[in-house]
Image (cartoon, helix red, strand yellow):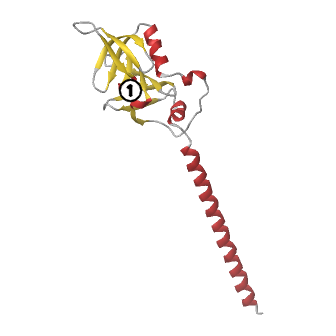
Amino acid sequence: MTPSDTSRWTLLFADLEAQLAAEEAAEREGAVAELTRAEQASVPLVDRLRAARGRPLRLDLRDGESLEGRLERVAEEWVQIDARSPRGGRWQHVVPLSAVVGIAGLGRHAAPSAARTDRLGLGTALRGLQRDRARVQVRTTAHVVLGRIARVGADHLDVEELDSARPAVRVVPFAALVRVSET
């Protein structure tokens, strides 16, 4: 064997080793990417919202309204957004997650539930407003009702209308709610 034959064999084996190392690196990168996608697929929206608590967000709602404000509370079924009112004051909005069609300003991070209050249902939040006799604006896909919450059922609420010529009670199914705002 001549010295040129030895260097040819050395180069050949070095090339084969480099190819194998590159294939192994690509396989590792592919496995990491697949694991990352699988982990991301297991993260619910509510966990991403919890990680954004205290930050400004814009919620696009199913009736076409966009609501901008600071994310204050997050539960499994709803969020509370604190926002400026058109008159310069502050409004607190309870928004069912089922009414949200898009979110701007949400980061990539997630935070799992850490408090028992994270599991409070929409009815519990609305009963708090009922107990306080708060003046509310109830927005549905078809109407806006100003009044006070008179009753909260398992899947609906009764709103005593305050600004109508004849005070009346309007029953609103939770499925129709877009938001309930304390005015």
Q: Is residue 167 left or right of residue 16?
A: left
Using the rendered image of the protein, determine whether residue 39 is visible from the camera's viewpoint. Answer: yes
Q: Nearer the viewer, residue 107 or 6?
A: 107
In this rendering, position of residue 44 left or right of residue 100: right
Q: Residue at x 38, y 23 (%)?
A: 179
Q: Position of residue 88 (x, y in %)?
A: 34, 17
The residue labelled by disc 1 is 175
Pick out the residue farthest to the right.
1
Q: Residue at x 35, y 25 (%)?
A: 176
Amino acid carrying mark 1 in the image = Ala
> In the rendered image, is residue 90 in sight?
no
Image position of 12 with respect to 126: above or below: below
How far across and how far down the image is residue 119, in percent? Answer: 55, 24
Task: Name above or below for residue 164 compared with residue 32.
Answer: above
Q: Which residue is outermost to the front?
A: 154
Q: Residues within 10 Å of mark 1 (few under 14, many from 20)?
A: few
Residue located 56% across and 42% down the image: 42
Q: Nearer the viewer, residue 88 or 47?
A: 47
Residue 64, picture quadrant:
top left
- Hey, which residue is sitting farthest bottom in the picture? 1
Q: Nearer the viewer, residue 24 or 157?
A: 157
Q: Where 43 sits versus 31, above or below? A: above
Q: Position of residue 2 (x, y in %)?
A: 76, 93
